[in-house]
Every structure is written in structure tokens, then in C-alpha cells.
Amino acid sequence: MAEILGKSEKDLKKCSKYLSEGNLVAFPTETVYGLGANAFDVEAVRKIFKFKQRPLTDPVIVHVHSFEQAQGLIDLLPFEEELYEFLTTKFWPGPLTIVATANEKIPKVVTAGGKTVGIRSPSHPLALELLRVSQLPIAAPSANRFGHISPTTAGHVYEDLGKCPILILDGGKTDVGIESTVVKLQQTSEKMISLTVLRKGAISNLDLEDALVGTKFETNVQVSVSSKIVDHKKLEELQQKKQEKEEENEKKNEKKNEKEKEKEKEKEKENENEKGEETIEKEESPGTNITHYAPDKPTFILTFNNLDKKKIEFEEEQEQLDLSKAIFVDYGGHRIDLKEKVLAYTDLSEEMDIKIATSSIYSTLRWTETIGNGQFVLLPDIAQITLKSKKKLPRMLPGLADRMFRSASGRKVLLNNDLQIQIIKQELF
């Protein structure tokens, strides 16, 4: 069973020892609570995947207390290292994860078999103290069931992982409320480096661009945002097929000599290229799965018509969604007219304060699960509401909108004039 601890020096030492012995500790960061293991201990990291029921295709972020500690975990070209250090001086400790080439110290289970590793230094004092006391790099995704709502309190961790043999450091409610921004750093030519946002968070691409202004990196670094959506079930199926094929080929090759085996392998590669078979692309960032941060109830985004002037297509087979059975999360009182028509109603921020909305999104989603008779959840189309309000778009908006999108598995609905819910046709892959 899990045990919740306080934040005394004794508790920190107990957690540090527990980590060094190959066990897991959940701890607060400024974003969400993480489920941590010694990043160098392969078996301990495997426990993360086991306890969370997390697919091995999803990489894990490593937490450190300083740039110097991060240096010992990555292989960078000189120009890359300059930019990496610059970003850490600007954004560490804080909610920015930097993905770069991992060195041989980082186990493949951490990187999901890839060549890169995401590293960040959290700003929560308890997290930093745990890192300093343990002197270990700590591999830690969010401390919840995979795909479920991320935890922002120790109680949330216990709700999801209370039956697991872990220690939980209680540092109170987290501040930011959503996971860190993940950015990949890669030198593309002798004088150019790309910074690609792989996962949106509190630090936006505009914040990154602003930090470069007036520096030697201003004209040598290109910032972009990835719109990639991953289906981990599909990745696991591809991995299984590949493994089965390799095992089958091994049996066939047992009786062949070395030269024949090499020729067979070359032919197989040529055939795969000719057939255009799907390949397994290693993921470099967590949080890119289409279904993530999701309540244990069907969830949809309630959007509204023709803001983008495009024709809307609806699903041919519509689920029967009764508005009176809905749990509705509003934003800025946009659809307060529905308050008496739904089963339960709340507002992320009546004043449209993006920081308040972001810090409370996960606790609100967990609240929706407590409404026993609620059949489904409706979330606000926060980006469209903000655009309609003519207010200046806050930089944290894309990060929050991304979490809502994935909470709903990208599914959107409309209300017609008769207050009937219509599911919009989904085209993601």
C-alpha cells in the first residue's frame, strides 16, 4: 500500500533511501505530481510502467537539480550545448523539458528505445530538495494511471496508485496545473539549431522566441511547434508484429550459415522498403497520445458553429447523448444558459483567467467523476470562446486547450437549436 509522508527532513531522507533501493516515490512539482525512480536503475524504471499500466512506447522525463547534472546525461555538439545551457539559465528551474541526444548512461527503457532523452529541473522546493538529497537523476512521468487525469495533489496520487508500494511526498496542490512544455533541441546545420515544441505547456513558443531576442542565438535558432498526434495502441501493435516477424525469421535462419543469413536480412530490408510497410517511429515526448488526461466518463468538447466558416460534418451513427445527463464545465460563463439544463455545472474561471483555469483543470476533471448519475462530460472550446471574446490570446492558452482536446480524445459536439447534441465527424489520422 502507498504511504503519504510530509515534507520534513526525515521524510526526505526516507524517500531518498527508498529510491536508492530501487523503489518508487511520488513527489510534487510545480506542474503535476510525478512518480519517480532512479533513472539509472532499469528495474526500478520498469516498475513505473507496471504501476501506471503505461506502454513501453512512451518515454519518461528525467528530473535533475541543475544544468551540471543534466550535462552528465546527454551528448551535445558545442553549439547545442551553448543553447541548452542558455535555455536552462532562462527557464530552469521551471516547467520546460529539453529533449536532446542521450548518452550511454540513460537506459533505453527511459527513452522508449529512442536516442533522445527529455530532461528538466522542477521549481517546486520539495522536488529540488529530494533531487539534492538523493543525488540521483529521477525518471518520473505523472503519478497516475496511464491516460487518466494527472494528479495535482497527494490525494489524487493515492486515488490512482494507493494499492502500489510507493511513498508519496505531500507538498500540497501544484501551482501550474498542467505538465511541462517539451522542446526538442537539434542542430540542423553548422550554424542553425531547431527548437521544436513537442508538447505544449505553460511556456509557449512565443516565450522561447522572446528569450532569444538580442542574443547570439536570435538568428541561428528556429522555433516551431509540432502538431503530431500518437496512437500508442497502434505503436504497440507494430512492435508486436515486428517482434513476431523477427522470431519467425530467427527460426528459419537457425540452419543457415552466416553469409546466407546476411543476404536474407538485406533482402528483407529491401522488401520492406518496396512494400512501404509501416515503421515504428520512436517517440521523443510523453503526452502526445490522442487519449490522455481523460476522466472515466465519455468526454466531448462543446464547440459552436461556423467560427472558421467551414462546413461541419457529423458522425453517421450518433450516440444518444441526453443533455440533462451531462456534466458541463464552462469557461467565462459562455454557456451559463445551460446551467439549469444539465445535471451538474461548474466554471473553470468566470473571469476567463487562464492561470486559474489551467491550475484547476485536472481537479475539475476529477470532480466530474464524482457526479454519480452523470453520463458524460462536456468541456468548453476554450480557444473559440477566447477568440469570440476579442480578448488578447494568453500564451498559456494552447497548453490548456491541448489538455482538453486530449481529455476528450479530440471529439467535439454541437448543440442544435432544439438542444440536441450532435457529434462532429472526427478526422485525426
Image (spheres, rainbow, N blue to C red):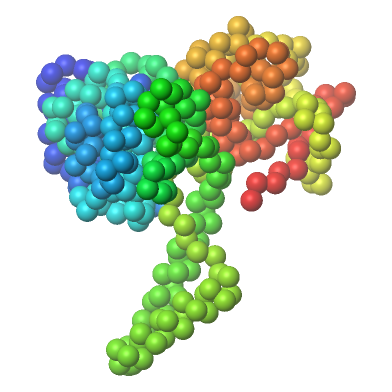
Q: Residue at x 52, y 79 (%)?
A: 271
- Name the quadrant containing residue 219: top left
Q: Position of residue 296 (x, y in %)?
A: 54, 34
For residue 199, above or below residue 351: below
Residue 36 vs residue 69: left or right?
Answer: right
Q: Position of residue 358 (x, y in %)?
A: 51, 19
Q: Position of residue 275 (x, y in %)?
A: 58, 75
Q: Residue at x 23, y 37 (%)?
A: 70
Q: Residue at x 80, y 41 (%)?
A: 314
Q: Position of residue 243 (x, y in %)?
A: 41, 69
Residue 69 vs residue 403: left or right?
Answer: left
- Name the quadrant containing residue 156: top left
Regarding residue 333, the answer to whether it shows in the image is yes
- Name the quadrant containing residue 80: top left
For residue 340, above or below residue 3: above
Residue 110 vs residue 211: left or right?
Answer: left
Q: Residue at x 48, y 68 (%)?
A: 241
Of all residues shown, which one is farthest toward the right? Answer: 417
Q: Please state which of residues 295 and 281 is positioned toward the viewer in this rendering.
A: 281
Number of numbered labels in the structure image: 0
Regarding residue 157, the answer to whether it shows in the image is no
